[in-house]
Amino acid sequence: MGFLEAIQVALQSLWANKMRTVLTMLGVVIGVASVIAVVTLSNGAKMFVVKKIANHGSDTLTVQRMNPVIFSGEEYLKETKRKNIDYDDFLYLQPACTRCVSIGASLNSSGTVVNGKQSTTNTEISGWTSSMFEINDLNVVEGRALTPTDDKMGTHDIVVGYDIVDNLLPNQDPIGQEIRVDGEVYTVIGVGERKGEVFGQSEDNYVDMPLSTYLHTHGEHQSLNISAKAGMVPGALDNLIDEVRALMRARRHDAVGTDDDFAILTNDTFISLFNQITGMFAGIIIGIAAISLVVGGVVIMNIMLVSVTERTREIGIRKALGAKRRDVMLQFLIEAATMALLGGFFGVLLGVALAEIVTTVVGFPSAVALWAVFLGLFVATSVGIFFGVYPAHKAAQLDPIVALRAEL
């Protein structure tokens, strides 16, 4: 029997038992769909985060009191003992940092913005030095940005996102309008460009005020974030990191040989942390999916054993007509592999569909990884072949005389 003829016979056999074939493939479909959905969502999230972080500049660093993600209780307790980074630290770094193209400081919290009877909740309230607009690449499309004078004088001028304009100041010129932010009255002097959504959360629901004003209205108990740009010259960021680390260690009196009493973060840091988190999540889901694939493989083996029993007389006739053991074994292996490959194919379609549904409903980004599609099909087919070997071998070993005596 030729290879193409074996495929044809396998498809005919599967088509003759359509319901059994569908139920047998179900485990493979679920396993592959789970893997494809997770990889598609993870890949989309990674591409989105990398793009968003890149928009903030690959030449930027941030000095914080603590790392944004901590993986152990011991590390957390250690970092909570660190001193806050305060405004005086920023004033020290500002003139001392010779490699800083631009340097700024910021604080943020969540608050409420009110205008008349309209209000927003969970609005990001940020205190910025004027240089943070350049560092964060925020373009002001209406009005103006904050200036060094706003920093110095502690004015109640603010730059807002379009969610504030759309919800609180619709159908009117927002510039010059007065609104309340956490109970204080501020004047809108600028509107930032639209950013859209991240994981279903709007990035346009924010208010930026001078950092000095924020410290006065919201208190000075929080630890500042200090950001600096190095410029796009090769090696400039590494040199800036070394300089800022030396300055901060001297400022905070860190002893020689001890760990830094602060954290310096770059785009690579954030991407690495994101990859660790998504990698852990994806690993768990893929592990569960692997169990589903094994269950699907066991079901395939069971059904193939039943098929061998049902077709004992057919196998005897084929052997009597000259079919060799390898021909019989090849036929049953192709049936198992075809069943698994079809399950993998439908699993890929289902996985992509599930990822697109999540993207549509929740706004979570997704991107189909071509390597994941081929990997899913390869793994599914491999599962079918692996679990189909024993039934195929059993069929190939049947004695043709005994097989011909089998009852139909």
Image (tube, helix red, strand yellow):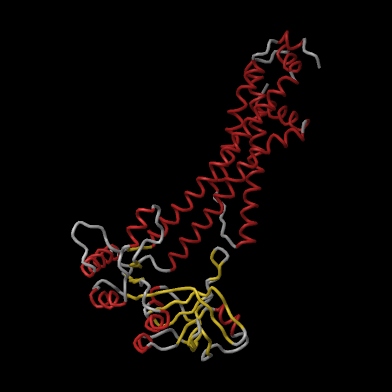
The relative height of residue 67 versus residue 333 in the rendered view (above or below) is below
Instruction: Identify the residue at horizontal 41%, vertical 81% (top origin).
Output: 214
Q: Which sits in the foreground, 347 or 114? A: 114
Residue located 63% across and 26% down the image: 333
**Where is residue 170, by image quadrant?**
bottom right
Image position of 403 (left or right of 37): right
Rendering coords of residue 34 (x, y %) = 60, 46
Q: Image quadrant for the C terminus?
A: top right
The quarter of the picture where residue 295 lies is top right
Residue at the outermost bottom position = 176
Above or below, 68 against 177 in this view is above
Outermost top residue: 401
The quarter in which the N terminus is drawn is top right
Answer with the quarter of the image where residue 345 lies.
Answer: top right
Identify the residue at horizontal 56%, vertical 75% (top origin).
Answer: 121
Q: Position of residue 160 (x, y in %)?
A: 50, 81
Q: Nearer the viewer, residue 257 or 336?
A: 257
- Rendered residue at 60%/38% (across/down): 292
